[in-house]
Amino acid sequence: EPEVTQTPSHQVTQMGQEVILRCVPISNHLYFYWYRQILGQKVEFLVSFYNNEISEKSEIFDDQFSVERPDGSNFTLKIRSTKLEDSAMYFCASSTRTGTNQPQHFGDGTRLSIL
Amino acid sequence: DAKTTQPNSMESNEEEPVHLPCNHSTISGTDYIHWYRQLPSQGPEYVIHGLTSNVNNRMASLAIAEDRKSSTLILHRATLRDAAVYYCILRDLTTSGTYKYIFGTGTRLKVLA
């Protein structure tokens, strides 16, 4: 069964450094998402992306965050200058369409640790 | 905020059926009910979704109340590998016309051997 893959599984970065998290969505999917989960807390929506532009973003997704689909397969989340509070699991998801009956399929996440 | 309410935790014996309830009293006519689960150190995993009729797949069954204000995820025979946090989700329609998930705290299912 096709799946969403994320790399790396764990990223350790010094505060203030830039970090790029990578995702390969399911190949025929057109809608892409990033969520995050701080340890012990709920999964939170960050951003949705379709047709090479952001569709929706949450309050968390400030100017330090950006997303890109640099080629036909990858979908990336960049944090320009990381803060301690950016430490979390980051999950990428994708779906074929965005109808209410279309499930999103999640990757297993990247654990980001900011030192 | 999440539009659903679930018990914080439940326990089940291995090999027995498990009924995980969810209340969604503010559901609209076009909202599908989605269920996901999150195993330790993994991403949310799609389980099942439905609109009005009961649904079955290889993982579980979904029973939806006639008024659609509640639903129940049924695991027919719980195994130790089913121990996870189960989320019942109604998706939010964003201003751009896309859908996003608003996760609640879910139900932590413990399966006893």
Image (tube, coloured by chain):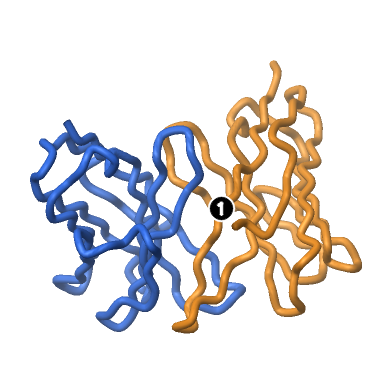
Chain colours: A blue, B orange
Q: In front here: B8 or A7?
A: B8
Q: Position of residue B102 (x, y in %)?
A: 55, 58
Relative vertical location of residue A101 with respect to residue B75 in this rendering, above or below: below
Give left or right: position of A25 versus B52. left
- In percent of the image, x 40 and y 64: which residue is there? A58
Relative vertical location of residue B5 with respect to residue B108 in this rendering, above or below: below
Q: Position of residue B27 (x, y in %)?
A: 75, 69
Give left or right: position of B4 versus B102. right
The residue positioned farthest toward the right in the image shown:
B66
The chain identifier of the residue carrying mark 1 reads B
Q: In front here: A29 or A12?
A: A12
Quarter of the N terminus of chain A within the rendering? bottom left
- In percent of the image, x 80 and y 50: which residue is there? B72
Relative vertical location of residue A52 with respect to residue A48 in this rendering, above or below: below
Quarter holding residue A103 = bottom right
SS of the residue under disc 1: loop
Quarter holding residue A2 = bottom left
Tell me the amino acid under the disc marked 1.
Answer: Phe
Q: Position of residue A65 (x, y in %)?
A: 22, 60
Crowding at dot 1, Cα within 10 Å, few <14 / some 14-19 / many 20+, comes out as many
Read off the residue under disc 1.
Answer: B103
- In percent of the image, x 76 and y 26: which residue is there? B12
Q: In front here: B30 or A38?
A: A38
Q: Position of residue B59 (x, y in %)?
A: 65, 48
- In percent of the image, x 21 and y 61: which residue is there? A76
Give left or right: position of A3 versus B71. left
Q: How many marks?
A: 1
The residue positioned farthest toward the top in the image shown:
B113
Quarter holding residue B85 = top right
